[in-house]
Amino acid sequence: MTEEKTYVEDIDRSLYDFRYEDKDAWKVDEGLSADIIKTISREKNDPEWMREFRLRSLEIYNRTPMVDWGPDIEGLDMKNIVTYVRPNTKMTADWEDVPETIRDTFEKLGIPQAERESLAGVGAQYDSELVYHNVKKEVAEQGVVYTDLESAMHGPYAEMIRSHFMKLVPPTDHKFAALHGAVWSGGSFVYVPPGVSVEIPLQSYFRLNAPGAGQFEHTLIIVDKGAYLHFIEGCSAPKYNIANLHAGCVELYVGEDAVLRYSTIENWSKNMYNLNTKRAKVEKGGKVEWISGSFGSHVSYLYPMSVLDGEGSRSEFTSVTFAGKGQNLDTGCKVVHNAPGTTSYVNTRSISKSGGISTFRSSVVIGNKAKNSKSAVSCQSLMLDDISRSDTIPAMDVRTDQADVGHEARIGRISDDAVFYLMSRGLSEEDARALIVSGFADNVGKELPLEYAVEMNNLIRLEMKGSIG
Amino acid sequence: MSDSLLSIKDLRVRVEEKEILHGISFDIKPGETHVVMGPNGAGKSTLGNAIMGNPSYEVTGGEIFFDGRNLLDMAVNERAKSGIYMSFQNPLEVPGVTLGNFIKTALEQRTGEHVRIWDFRKKMLQAMSVLQMDPSYAERDLNVGFSGGEKKKAEILQLMLLSPSLAILDETDSGLDVDAVRTVSEGIRAFQKNQDSALIIITHNAAILNSLHVDATHILVGGKLVRSGDASLVDEISEHGFTAYETLS
């Protein structure tokens, strides 16, 4: 009888599904109240303005109605969600100092190895707090700041954080933005000074381990004039039979002529409600590049938004979404063209299988100031069987007649001929299909650093397992 | 009979509701090259697809034995692993995997052994030079954006590197210009040097056969083998065409 509550398909996700009991982790009570918020604020040693910000956000949360336009989130009962779980450790810059079970978790996920081999800096969050943060000396010497928000709020960047924190995504934006404002914890603060190019990527990894918990990390990245940064975020969680919630927030400020590439592979377990808000503001001549892979989660609402505020600013959005059994993934993106000569390019792929629902939702707004702007949206869907569903809901709002907009949507299936072709070379049917699906997701795969592309293809192979017959 | 590599008996094949092959039989011994010729729509490609096991082609009667095993009981990939290869008339484009990596994967599937990358690369570059293929094609996604000619060359490249014991070349020459036919034919000749490997060349054009050794020729018209003979039959067809046989079907 207990099994019927699980939405999780019986595939081997053991790579991600291992978990440790944290008997000595400290948590707040389930649910939401001013007392809980005050406790979190005290625990986190917030400055006064942040404490007030949290309480104000809670008020907004309480008076904002639940979203009613997307996938069903009735299974998410805030009364049962633990909003703050502090692992029994302090943040450190040495993996040796991270408690063994937590270190082991990140070892299994390959984070320390990736750090040694291909990253300029790493932040690792376990439940509500960062347990590890380190940035390579050479990068730090360029003046690049990569740290946790909590300590940065008490340091030399306190003012910068205060003037940017939840200014792009205000708590009034929607109910879960308000929730985030009230209970946020963990995440990263990155500042890249003018003209500095960070040659190798920085990465944050978020691991939600506690059952019935919420993760509300906040990522604030400011890339100053003419600077370059590639930031990677990875997320995962083991599966439980009770709902978990992820309501993170990402705010990206891209300065004049700066370029920020922001890559994520989200791989939540299938009991997760992933209600994430991401937004970028781009100044004159700057560019934001979103690379996004959405796997796992029970329900996702995810629409990274680019506000093209400066003349000639650009946005590129490349994503893939894979919805399997019991999953309803509503993903897409928004672009607001606010200045002349701005360009947006959207290229998405969605895959649905075993009754999964995948919806692509986009909104492109070209304002009346955005003369000579261009937008091209292309979305392709792949349905792997007859019981799955794929929807495309593109919206365009063009307020100037001097704009060039295009939209293209395609929906398809795996061709029997392609499967036969690959099988005729010795591949099993399962491998043939997995290869075709990986190829379909290659728009994202080829933009990711090699080791992430490999991980993504492993995820696809995992999702494709047992898909035959 | 027992020394046959491939033995086809009274094979009947249907595509959707229509029977295309009405009972054909022939045998191939190791090392032999057989040519199957016939006008458009005669069922030539159906024959190749049935041997390879394309699920769109339903075998309704007869049998196919390969190396003593009943092929009709085997899945497509099992047939491939047992040593059968088909060069496709219209090779499919598969993004996400490079031609080089794909051949390496196929080779590993076939042999069940890990392929050593440097040895493999060396062989691949040699084969590519025979086919006058630019080495950069090995790094490109499988057939994606290849011209018709390059796709066919990529098929022959796979043939050369996988060295199957039976290869079916389905209209490999169609859509190729004279020079490309000659180049592809070089690759096939290199494959023929492998003493034990048998070939079925499906074509309606004799040009590809000019420099190749041929052991037997079968004329397929209207889903039946109307005549079988030696290599000289190819010349006869080149001169007179199939008209003499169409009334026979």
Image (cartoon, rainbow, N blue to C red):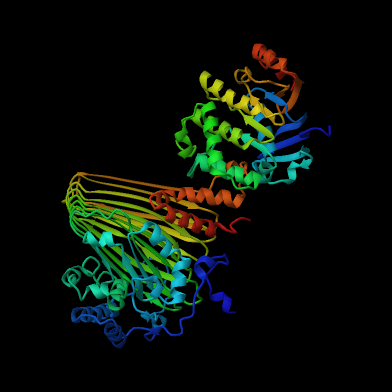
Q: Residue at x 60, y 79 (%)?
A: A1
Location of residue B17 in the rendering, given as x and y in whole percent from the top left corner = 68, 39
- Quarter assignment of residue A466: bottom right
In this rendering, the answer to whether A429 lies above or below A145 is above
Q: Residue at x 68, y 20 (%)?
A: B213
In this rendering, the answer to whether A104 lies above or below B16 is below
| Viewer can see residue B46 | no
Location of residue A461 in the rendering, given as x and y in whole percent from the top left corner = 53, 56
In this rendering, the answer to whether B113 lies above or below A231 is above
**Relative to residue A41, is residue A102 drawn left or right?**
right
**Relative to residue A34, is residue B29 drawn left or right?**
right
- Quarter assignment of residue A143: bottom left
Location of residue B96 in the rendering, given as x and y in whole percent from the top left corner = 47, 46
Front-most of B213 and A49? B213
In this rendering, the answer to whether A368 lies above or below A79 is above
Q: Residue at x 72, y 40 (%)?
A: B59
| Viewer can see residue A11 | yes
Front-most of A389 and A465? A465
Residue furthest to the bottom in view is A35
Residue furthest to the top in view is B239
**Relative to residue B203, is residue A107 drawn left or right?**
left
Q: How many marks?
A: 0
Q: Quadrant of the C terminus of chain A?
A: bottom right
Location of residue A96 in the rendering, given as x and y in whole percent from the top left corner = 40, 73
- Quarter assignment of residue A151: bottom left
